[in-house]
Image (cartoon, helix red, strand yellow):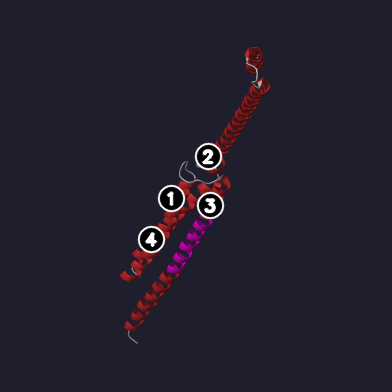
Amino acid sequence: MNKVMKVKMMLILVGICLTIHMPKGYSQSTEIAQLLLNVAKWEALQENLKTLKKGYEVLTKGYKAVKDISEGNFNLHDAFLGNLWQVSPTVKNYKKVSEIIQTEIRIIKEYKSGFQQCLKSGQFSANELDYLERVFKRVTDESVENLDELLMIITARQMRMNDEDRLNAIDAISVDMESKLSFVRRFNASNQTLLFQRIKQHSDLELQKRLEGFPE
């Protein structure tokens, strides 16, 4: 027997006792009705409390579910961003990585070769040599910056990028490095042309001087 039934039985017994022992003139039916009404109110209160409890449990479970989902999404998001710090073998083994390094080596080698040729020729003034050196230095400084960026792209925990972005960035560096190498070659070719012209002019002048020194 549950608590509600026990209370009902107790109130019925109380009502019977009141009916037997209550003095005449007292409204027995009214008292019993009031007691039964109180039982009904108590039952209703119990049901309300149960409903509130169920509602709280549903709310709690719902909040927990939302919280778990939210944390789950955050964990997935965090894991995704964490993966962006990593560098896949596809990026590390991309052929243009080694090509960029080889291009840098050619830039330095051809720059030094061209500058040394102008320096040893004796056909360029100090100001001209200073200008050539500054131009070469600017190009090599920019190419070194490209290598620094490349190193960051292919090194884990340096840049947050997916594979496609990393490969696109490497492609852009490759294009820029090839452009710099082409510039160094054109610049060297231009200086070499000027050098040959001056050597020829000097040779022609020396020949003219010798011819002018011969007796008629």
Secondary structure at numbered mark 2: helix
Residue 155 screen position, x and y as percent: 47, 43
Instruction: For residue 206, say whether it is visible.
Output: yes
Secondary structure at numbered mark 3: helix
Residue 116 lies, with reference to residue 67, above or below; the image says below
- Asked if the magenta segment contains residue 184, the reply would be yes
Between disc 4 and disc 3, the foreground one is 3
| Extreme residue in the front direction | 25
Between disc 4 and disc 1, the foreground one is 1
Name the residue beneath numbered marker 3: 169
Helix, strand or loop: magenta stretch: helix
Marks 1 and 3, how far apart at CA: 13 Å
Residue 182 screen position, x and y as percent: 50, 61
- How many other residues sit within 10 Å of disc 2, few (<14), some (14-19) or many (≥20)? few
Point out the image quarter for the C terminus: bottom left
| Extreme residue in the bottom direction | 216
Q: Which disc, if any, is residue 148?
A: 1
Marks 4 and 1, how far apart at CA: 16 Å
Between disc 4 and disc 2, the foreground one is 2
User: Which residues are the magenta region?
Assistant: 173-192
**Residue under the point 59% across and 36% down:** 66
Name the residue beneath numbered marker 4: 137
Three-letter code, disc 3: Ala
